[in-house]
Amino acid sequence: MTQASPSLDRARPEAKGAGFDIGRVLLEGRAYFALIAIVVVFSALSPYYLSVSNFLTMSSHVALFGILAIGMLLVILNGGIDLSVGSTLGLSGVVAGALMQGVSIGALGVVAYPPVWVVAVLCCLLGAAIGLVNGVLVARFKVPAFVATLGVMYMVRGVALLMTNGLTYNNLGGQPALGNTGFDWLGFNRIAGVPIGILVLVVIAVVGSLLLTRTPFGRWLYASGGNERAAELSGVPVKPVQVAVYMMSGVCAAVAGLILSSQLTSAGPTAGTTYELTAIAAVVIGGAALTGGRGNVRGTLLGAFVIGFLSDGLVIIGISSYWQTVFTGAVIVLAVLLNAVQYRGRAKRPAAAGGRTPSPRPAA
Amino acid sequence: MGPQTADRDGDVVLTARNVAKSYGNIHALKGVNFDIRAGRVTTLFGENGAGKSTLMKVLSGVVGPTSGTIELRGEPVVFASSSEARDRGISIIHQELSLAPNLSVRDNIFMGREITGPAGIDYAEETRQAAALMAELEEEIDPATPVEDLRLGQRQIIEIARALSVDSRILIMDEPTSALSASEVEVLFKVIRDLTARGVAIVYISHHLEEALEITDFAVVLRDGAMTAKADRADIDLEWIVRNMVGEGYDLGSPPAGYPFGGVALSVRDVSVADKSGHGAMVVDGLSLDVRAGEIVCIYGLMGAGRTELLECVFGKVAKVAGEVWLEGREISRLSIAERIANGLALVPEDRQRDGLVQTMSVGENLSLASIGAFVRGLLLSRPAERAVIDSSIRAVTVKTSGPSAAIGSLSGGNQQKVVIGKMLGTHPRVIMLDEPSRGIDIGAKAEVFRILAERARAGLAVVFSTSEVSECLSIAHRVVVMSRGRISAEFGRDADHTVTKEQIMAASGEAVAA
């Protein structure tokens, strides 16, 4: 359906005057405009902001939150929330760090040094396992998502602290003799000048987008997030879908954990604290509804970029980090406010819908 | 049309004069004139979208009229809000009750206008008044009971008590019986008669024509926002209402004939379903029913007869405690809902907003939701294949929509129902069960739904539908099964030599037949 503005007009008969169309465009594309405004304002304020190298630097900061946010989006589309991703990110880094130090096997005194790809796979499996716990609690035992993932958040953080006794792994480089070098690849290498973190984000975004728009799973997710009962009666496997989204969110968090510890070349047990809130903020700024069923990857990415580019911009022009916190909060509140405006507009539509169907027959 | 009921005429308390209401280019009301009289029940009849709700909103001050006036006892009035209207003695009871289930009866009655004394809320006084109201309404409900513990019918009474507590002289009731059992309807009607005896004017709205006729004194019929007829109860009958509502003779169809039934498609054997409250009571009690391919079976029963539970149990939504369900010679009790759909079973649920539609998805996505497997190519959904599925569904059930990408909420109730039916027909079922398929849709759409079902039955589909309107039993069904308290209390064939009357059906359901 290619809908030009006249037909949009027809879809909103209660719209008064011509100025409304502009308002509507601004409303629907608000994340784009916010991002453009941020880039324009900071470019004007600082000569260093508008450059390829700065954009790549900022983007690799964004990548971390973007990956978390895409996982979070899946959960939020389902009508849930995942507060445990920050902790999962931290634990993933710590486990990677521990594995890089070598694993003693049993009483044999043998120390195994798994290669980096094995470490990465194991961390992803760990993330999936944490997600599985979340998902089973929510889907099977009907624990409210907020509480279930809050509990898991504390437990996972606690495990990370226990594993390291509160300390940080600093030696993640590996040794050529042990065949476990290359952990810094994720954080430092570039392909065609683009940091690996950004490429990982792009891959996850493309896969996530395909998953949501082009697979049965995506359709199931939107349906069960929009109306679980109707989805179930239409044959949608709502419980497996629910478990799966938490597992995917866990994997995304684990990947982000690997990238972060690689960038920092260290793995601390407190890494990623409050990152879950930033991820939720990105999803919300991207226009997703916390009630489920509405949202997409594009919006979520925009949300992540808005947050990332804003806070990095504030750093570049030298505004105190306290002010950054205030600004970020204001952006989130504004975004939620606009979401409410947008969805209220949609809810109103059916009331006056009766007589304007362009179908040849008169509407019932 | 003589004024035979002149002795019951009360004073005119509220008058609508040329009331019109437009939303943009939509003219929801086009100059409506009528009086509401004290001590009488005035019923608004009309299909969905005829303007009943808009008219009510205007009368109760929720929205203002675009033109025309409302006169309260002869004086033109303008209400700024519904609470202002309530202060002037006009209360509205919406279809969706506006009670807080977690609060007590007393707290709900006085919600927003608590009686306060020097020490905060005067609970003793509130309790006393609430108890007095309950006594007045002859309902034995303790004012301290939480509303969530009450049955729906009782909750309705609480709403009425709330209206009475502000001394409403005009009470507008929107579909008050839509979720009540027959006995609860009786109680409600008794309350309404008591109220009218005390001079309260009632404005009543219902889709349930037979029921409304029982209580009404005066009928006003709306069609397309205009008033098409008004008359005293004594001068009208069901057909008069329907004729004026629809504007033409209506026909819900007759059983499709001239083809043989196939084998038994669905067989329900001694199925029992326990009551949700878990007290060991059975909502479906050892019920058996066979439906053959091509046959249309109507399950008639009152609210609470166990129709919904039976259908949901067959579909796997609620668990049964005993019995077997066979679909085309296969026991399906262990299958999931998805597997039952794959094996050719379909259910159109009773509450399409709650169980039928995903409001966040488009018309097309709703239509294709149950048959996603049909347009997966490899791992991905094929857009062209999906479009083909959606287009054929839209054609099959004649959904009037601006296109597959339209918001589901933009459709009328009847078209939304067709989307739910189309979605389930899209799974190519062998047996389709529809729970109250006509609920909340207008007569035109109803006739169309029945026509679609009759067509499919002719092609070999076994159809089971439930209803609480007798006129629907006598439409396309080959066989009418009457359910009462979880059992089949009677069965009527619709062959030429079997003439079933509405009275027979209603008597079997345990419903009191109005003379």
Image (cartoon, coloured by chain):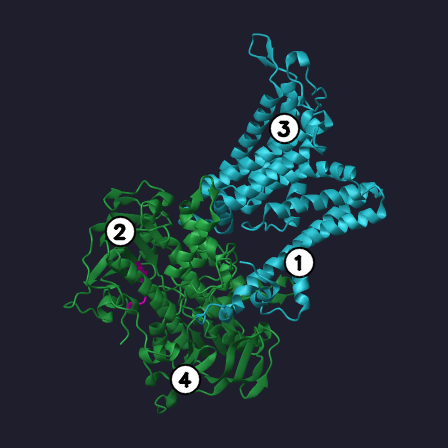
Magenta-tinted stretch? B465-470
- Among the 4 quarters of the image, the one containing residue A73: top right
Q: Are marks 3 and 1 on the same chain?
A: yes
Task: Give neighbour class at mark 3: few <14, some 14-19, many 20+ (Cα, 10 Å).
Answer: many
**Chain the render paints green:** B
Residue B321 shows in the view: yes
Q: Which residue is mark 1?
A: A27
Residue B466 in magenta stretch: yes
The percent coordinates of residue A275 (x first, y second) are 67, 38
User: Considering only vertical position in the picture, is B174 above or below B34?
Assistant: above
Q: Which residue is mark 3?
A: A91
Does label 4 or label 2 sit earlier along the sequence?
4
Residue B452 in magenta stretch: no
Q: Secondary structure at mark 4?
A: strand
Query: Distance from label 1 to label 2 (Cα)?
Result: 55 Å
User: Considering only vertical position in the picture, is A246 above or below A26?
Assistant: above
Q: Name which residue type carries label 4.
A: Lys
Q: Which residue is mark 4?
A: B230
- Asked if marks 1 and 2 touch (Cβ < 8 Å), the reply is no
